[in-house]
Amino acid sequence: MNYKIYFLTFLISLCSTIVAFSSDTSKNEDHPYLYQDFLEKNNTALNIKNYDKIIKDSIKHPEFFRKFIFRKMEEYLNKDLTDMARSSLDDDINQLIALYELPKGEHFLHDSWIQYKNWTQAEKELKLETDALIRGEKTSDLKQESLILHCLENYQKINDTMGIFNAKLSLLNNNISNNYSPDINSQIKELEDFADKEGLTSEKIQILPLKALSHLYKGEFNNTLEQLEIAQQEAEKTGNPLNKARIDLQKGNIFSKTGYYDDAQKSFESALNTFKYLGSGEEQATIFISLGNLMLRKNNPNGALDYFENAQSIYKNIDDLSGQSKVLNNLGVTYDGVKKPEDAKKSFESSLEIAKKLNDSRQISETANNLGNFYLKNNQIDKAIESYKQSISSSKKLESNETEIQALHNLGLAYYFSSKKQEAISSISESLALSRRSGQDHDAMESSFVLGKIFIEDKNPEKAKTFLDISLENARKLGNTKKIEDIDKILKEIEKPQK
């Protein structure tokens, strides 16, 4: 049994679901919310009509000022405003837009503001509800693609240009990440043309990293790096630090996925420093999570704890329950790695509790899968099976099947270690079929490898060879030399003439 547990621990380490984005790992106390400072100062200035003060701040922080105007425009849509407050806010917004756009000769905010004011009350409520939905403030059992299309349809109903762009950007990102369409390049071109037509110069920069991602998912790593360099140059031309930070964040994610961990850390830290300056708390938390995951990949769980705790502190500060659930899941994985089982279990259970309250199927599936791994490593097989089944059930509500693939694989391991070999083969085979259909080469490599090992144990070398050949094919595709060596060694053994 000790051998089995050792083998199990190795396999599970490959199948945990960790949510996927400064060298200073302090609690981020040095002005963590500069944007909040900007809001407070300029709200005060606005109350006394001190537009000179606002002009000075807008020159220093144009990205804050644009965000400030959009915030005021959303406030105007609130049905609870009194007529007097609405009239005063209308005057203020007109003044703010003039301050922002006249010197630049722009008109996008002015045109949007006319739309905002002409909407019916139902249209205003639809705008606020859809903004909250696409930002993730509300969750839904709708599959991800269906959710974005629903938001896009709402924005098109009210002709909300910025909303349409954001929804199309999310849809493009989703399509690239899940490999849905072979025609990604035409989708990218269509969105760029839309941005040009509507004068969304700053927002267009956000499309560039997606070009890099499209190359990455096609296995064109050199083209990925080249496209990231182009994106970096274009971002720097705008003079807007927010654009550069977004590119740095994307670079970090790509380097992390491809094993260039030192380059990933530099990119994440560069983005983090910019987001600290911009006072963007949520983005800082996202990077802390990415850095924590990076530390786990570098086998530094104590370093990961620091980053995840920083992220959790920010999410609690801004009362973001979804973010808290995400980090608690990651903390559970990390506590498990540093041999703190009680803390790990508590973190997983808290993450699940919040995710269920929010009806967040994605987080339920990811956390339940990790909780299953925790139970399995601690030889609580029945609880592990229950958790994996919960993960699979929630995963089926999502467009992405990544967690379903992992949970099916892990469920098969749980059956195997409870001596239910046929159930194990069935579950892992289902995981393999799903991973091969969706192009998840790493998962296909691992599931076929385990099936090969099971059939060797079952003294069925022909079936074992079939699955090991599949694993070898995927290992070569991924360039995984260690796995190739392991499979070659096993194949030579089973191909030896029997004495």
Image: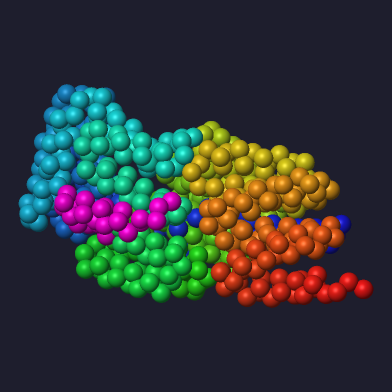
Residue 203 at x, y percent in the picture: 25, 54
Nearer to me, 233 or 402: 402
The residue depicted at 67 percent of the width and 57 percent of the height is 447
Q: Does the magenta stretch include residue 203?
A: yes
Q: Which secondary structure class fits the magenta region best?
A: helix
Residue segment shown in magenta: 180-205
The residue depicted at 23 percent of the width and 24 percent of the height is 121
Residue 19 at x, y percent in the picture: 53, 53
Say above or below: 194 vs 80: below
Residue 266 at x, y percent in the picture: 43, 71
In the displayed structure, does residue 342 sit left or right of residue 183? right
In the displayed structure, does residue 282 sit left or right of residue 388? left
In the displayed structure, does residue 59 sit left or right of residue 429? left
| Residue 16, picture quadrant | bottom right
The residue depicted at 89 percent of the width and 71 percent of the height is 498
The residue depicted at 7 percent of the width and 54 percent of the height is 105
Say above or below: 5 vs 263: above
| Image quadrant containing the N terminus | bottom right
| Image quadrant containing the C terminus | bottom right
**Quick check: can you spot residue 272?**
no
| Count of numbered tags | 0
In the displayed structure, does residue 86 sit left or right of residue 356? left
Nearer to me, 494 or 28: 494
Nearer to me, 118 or 179: 179
| Visual colour scheme | rainbow
**Quick check: can you spot residue 216?**
yes
Q: Does the magenta stretch include residue 281?
A: no
Residue 296 at x, y percent in the picture: 59, 63
Residue found at the far right of this picture: 499
